[in-house]
Amino acid sequence: MDPITTALVAGATFILKDAASEAVKDAYRGLKDLLSGKLSSLANLEEDPADEDYRKAAEKELQKKGLANDPVVLGKAGKLTQAIEREPPEQLVAASIDIGGLRAAHDVIVKRLNAAGDVRVRDVRSVQGTIDIQDVSTVVPGKN
């Protein structure tokens, strides 16, 4: 996924799971407001950010409309990603993790993921290098 779709999916997921801090909500709202009226696939993506067809539609529409390379849109997506990255670990664990459509020129390293929901890893490719996935787990909230 491109960085804008990735940010939209992550932000919508946090908001749907009621796991978003005010900083994440504000950053998501900023990106959403910027894309409102320009991205018709946004409503579907917000309804079900885990749906692969909705993700692909948003990504395709961003490309088709020239928004995928728009520096203002990329900046807002970057701010949302940064807000999510600043969340405390216990907040990040509240969401499911879905890694898919990942392409790398060299190595892919995924380590120490913990989710209260599903963890899904699929369609990860390295052109020249290794794929190393370690220490991935899920927990049921309220249980050990």
Image (cartoon, rainbow, N blue to C red):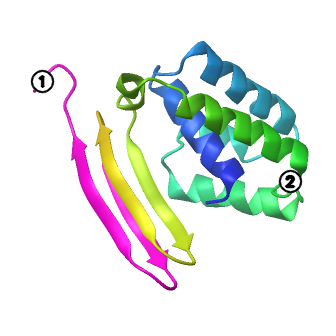
Q: Is residue 135 visible?
A: yes
- In this rendering, position of residue 67 left or right of residue 28: right
In this orientation, which residue lies closer to the viewer: 133 or 77? 133
Q: Quadrant of residue 15?
A: top right
- Find numbered disc 1 in the image and state the secondary structure of the residue it sits on: loop
Q: Position of residue 84 (x, y in %)?
A: 56, 31
Q: Position of residue 51 (x, y in %)?
A: 50, 51
Q: Position of residue 66 (x, y in %)?
A: 89, 59
Q: CA distance from mark 1 to mark 2?
A: 43 Å
Residue at far bottom of view: 128
- In this rendering, position of residue 136 left or right of residue 34: left
Give the answer, above or below, for where 86 lies relative to 129: above
Q: Is residue 121 magenta?
A: yes
Mark 2: amino acid: Leu
- Find numbered disc 2 in the image and state the secondary structure of the residue it sits on: loop
Give the mark nearest the N terminus, 1 or 2. Answer: 2
In this rendering, the count of numbered labels is 2
In this orientation, which residue lies closer to the viewer: 110 or 52? 110
Q: Which residues, given as a range, are shown in magenta?
A: 118-144
Query: Which quarter shows the C terminus?
Result: top left
Q: Residue at position x 39%, y 78% from top? A: 130
Q: Can you identify the residue that label 1 sits on?
A: 143
Q: Residue at position x 88%, y 58% from top? A: 65
Mark 1: amino acid: Lys
Q: Residue at position x 70%, y 53% from top? A: 58
Dot 1 surroundings within 10 Å: few (below 14), some, or many (20 or more)? few
Q: Is residue 136 magenta?
A: yes
- In this rendering, position of residue 77 left or right of residue 100: right
Query: Which quarter shows the N terminus?
Result: bottom right
Q: Can you identify the residue that label 2 sits on?
A: 67
Q: Quadrant of residue 56?
A: bottom right
Dot 2 surroundings within 10 Å: few (below 14), some, or many (20 or more)? some
